[in-house]
Image (tube, grey):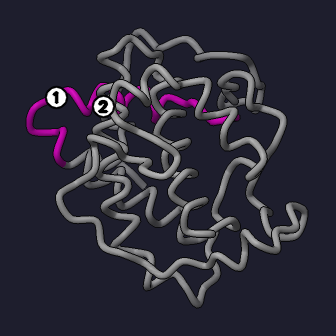
Amino acid sequence: MKIKQTARHWATKQALTVPGVRSVTRSGLVYLHTRIFLSKADPSHRDERTDHLDALFEGTIDAYTAGLTAGYTEAEAREITHIQANFDFYNHGWVEMMEIPVSEIETHYDRYREFFEAHDITIEQPLGEFRPTTVPTAPKTPDKLESLDPERDQPNAEGGYADDVYVEDESGNVQVGDTEQPDDVDLSDAVGSPDDP
């Protein structure tokens, strides 16, 4: 998968470890991700998916911190969460929201199989042990999967990045693996900080 990595990502990673800041950062991350992925959904389905996505992203934040604790890099830990979200979208038939082609679902699972199996994560159960107590249901659109035309139905999916984590830096350059973490991470760059746009 290709993901971006900027000063904001490094600051957010650090903010998740700071007492008093952590909860604000978590809330900011949930709000941000729900908003981003709803913008990719058919407008007629956005309202009915909001609560489900909020719970989904609550769980993926816990998976992110577990990934970091297990020794995965920042980009790898974040990619794990994006893959979990894509499993969920796939299960619901929300193919227009997916970042990876349907055909690459199992390849992405296999890359992180050790982590996923350790936390009871499967394609069918994307959150595994990180599933919140309550995850509101949202209507599925299985017909989108059954008659899938990748060119037409997956406008946000970018294929060809299933063999590793690819990172795009602030200048638009793409490399395999993380960019270099700044020496002077500024928490004001973190998602959810008072200076967050």
Q: Is residue 77 left or right of residue 128?
A: right
**Which amino acid type is marked by label 2?**
Leu
Among the 4 quarters of the image, the one containing residue 169: top right
65 vs 144, nearest the viewer:
144
Badge nearest the viewer, 2 or 1: 1
Residue shown at the point (46%, 33%) measured from the top left: 9
The residue shown at (63%, 16%) is: 177
From the viewer's perspective, is residue 48 above or below residue 17?
A: below
Q: Is residue 194 visible?
A: no
* Distance between the alpha carbons at the discs numbered 2 and 1: 10 Å
**Residue drawn at (71%, 47%) of the image:** 100
Residue pointed to by mark 1: 18
Task: Give 108 or 71, whichever is nearer the viewer.
Answer: 108
Position of residue 145 in the picture relative to residue 30 (left or right): right
For the residues labelled 2 and 1, say whether their Cβ atoms are less than 8 Å apart: yes
Answer above or below: position of 132 versus 13. Answer: below
Location of residue 46 in the rendering, given as x and y in whole percent from the top left corner? 51, 81
Does 115 appear above or below 100? above
Residue 59 image point, x, y percent: 31, 48
Which label was assigned to residue 187?
Answer: 2
Residue 20, image x, y percentages: 9, 38
Range of residues picked out in magenta: 1-23
Badge 2 local density, few (<14 within 10 Å), some, or many (20+)?
many
